[in-house]
Amino acid sequence: MLPFTFTRPVADIRLGILTIREKWEKLLNKKSFSLTEEYLYGKFPASPDSSPAIYVNGSVLPDENLIAAINKLGALQSLIVDGSLIAFKSEKHHLNYENFEAIAKGFAAVEYKEKLISVHNLWDIFAMNNDALKSDFELLTKGRKSQKLSDSNKLIGSAENLFIEEGATVEASVLNTYTGVIYVGKDAEIMENCAVRGPFALCEHAALKMSTKVYGATTLGPHCKAGGELNNVIFFGYSNKAHDGFLGNSVIGEWCNLGADTNNSNLKNNYGSVEVFNYREGKAINTGLTFCGLMMGDHSKSGINTMFNTGTVVGVSANVFGADFPPKFIPSFSWGGNRWLLTFSLEKSFEVAERVMQRRSIKLDEADRKILQTVFDREEKYRKR
C-alpha cells in the first residue's frame, strides 16, 4: 500500500466516509492502537498495557459477522481466511512488529468462511469506494435525522439517500441520489452550481468549489477543497484541488495540492490494462483495470497545467511541474517533471509542510519530522535511479 503507508498504518487509509480504523472503533465503541513500524509510533502509538488484547489485520474492513467471529475467539486462537491471518487474541502486549505473525502461527486456527472485504493494492481504495460509502452512510446515519436541504437546490432521487450534518451548507446545486447516497459532513460546504451524482461523501470542513462536477464513487476527506471534474476519487484529508481540471480513478493522500488545470489520464488510448509501480516488486505491475489514474502520497504537489499519465504513482513530498507528462513513477522528495528530477531537500520540505499545516492551525511536530526523515532515507535508492 505504499506510498500511503509510508506515513500511516494501513488502518488509517480512508475508504468510504471513514478510515478503516474509524469503522472498527465506531462498531466496537472502543479506541484502537497500532502495531506498526517503530518510526510511526510517535504519531500512531502502540497499545497500552491491558489484558487480553485482540489484534486485527488493519487492511480488513469490519462488519457484524466478522466482529462476532472475533469476539468468539478464545485465548491462543486465531482467525484465518485462505491462510491469511485476520485476527487473534493474546495475553502478550507490545508484540514485535517483525514477529507477531510467527507468534500467531502457534495459535489454534479458526477458519472464517463469510465474505471478507480487505484492501491489498493501491487501486482497491477507489475500486471499493462504492460499497464502502454505502456501508458507512448506513453506519453514520442510522436512527438520525438529516438537516433540511435548502430550496435553492434540486434533488433528483430519494431524500432518504441524502444526509446533511449540522453546520453544513448546500446552495443552488443539483444532487442525484438515484445513483447512490450523498453525505455532507459537519461544517462542509457545496457551493453554487455544483452537480453531484452519488455515491459521494464530503467530510467535515471540506468544500466543493463553484460549478464542480462530481461522479461517484467519490470521497473528499476532512478539510479538503475540490473543483473542476472528479470521477471515483478519494482524498484522505487536508488536500486541495481547488481549480478546473479532471481527476479520475485516483487516490490523493494528506497535505497535497494540485495546481490549476492539473489533469490525469485514467484510460489508455488502446483501452488496455493499466500498469502501476509497485514498491514490493520494484517495478510496474498489471492492475487488470481499464480505468486507473493517479496515486499521490502525502505532502506532494503539482504545478499549474500538470498532466499525469494513466497509472502514475507519486511518492511523499514530491513537487511535480513542467510541460509534457512526468514519469509514471516519481519517488518521494523528487523535484521536477518530464525532463529531469532533482532531490527535494529535506529541510526545504519541512519548511513547506510547516507553512501548509499552519494554514489549518496544525503544527509539524517531531513525530512528523521523524516520519518524513525515514521516508527520505528509504527512497534515496529510487531517486538515484
Image (cartoon, rainbow, N blue to C red):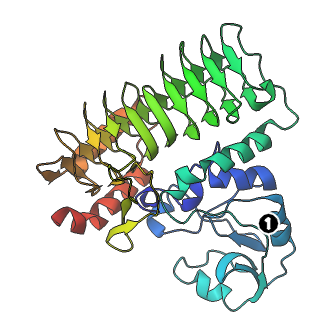
Q: Nearer the viewer, residue 4 or 278?
A: 278
Task: List x then y, in percent, for residue 203.
Answer: 61, 33
Q: Which residue of the protein is positioned furthest toward the bottom in this rendering?
A: 106
Q: Residue at x 38, y 58 (%)?
A: 272
Task: List x then y, in percent, for residue 381.
Answer: 22, 69
From this view, report whether residue 303 is shown above or below residue 337.
Answer: above
Amino acid type, residue under disc 1 in the picture? Leu
Q: Residue at x 55, y 34 (%)?
A: 215
In the rendered structure, the answer to whether residue 368 lies left or right of residue 315 reads: right
Q: Residue at x 69, y 36 (%)?
A: 180
- Locate residue 175: give its quadrant: top right
Q: Nearer the viewer, residue 138 or 253?
A: 138
From this view, report whether residue 140 is shown above or below residue 66.
Answer: above
Q: Which residue of the protein is positioned furthest toward the top in this rendering?
A: 152
Circle 1 sits on which residue? 66
Q: Residue at x 79, y 74 (%)?
A: 52
- Locate residue 169: give its quadrant: top right
Disc 1 secondary structure class: helix
From this view, report whether residue 381 is shown above or below residue 140.
Answer: below
Task: List x then y, in percent, for residue 141.
Answer: 80, 36
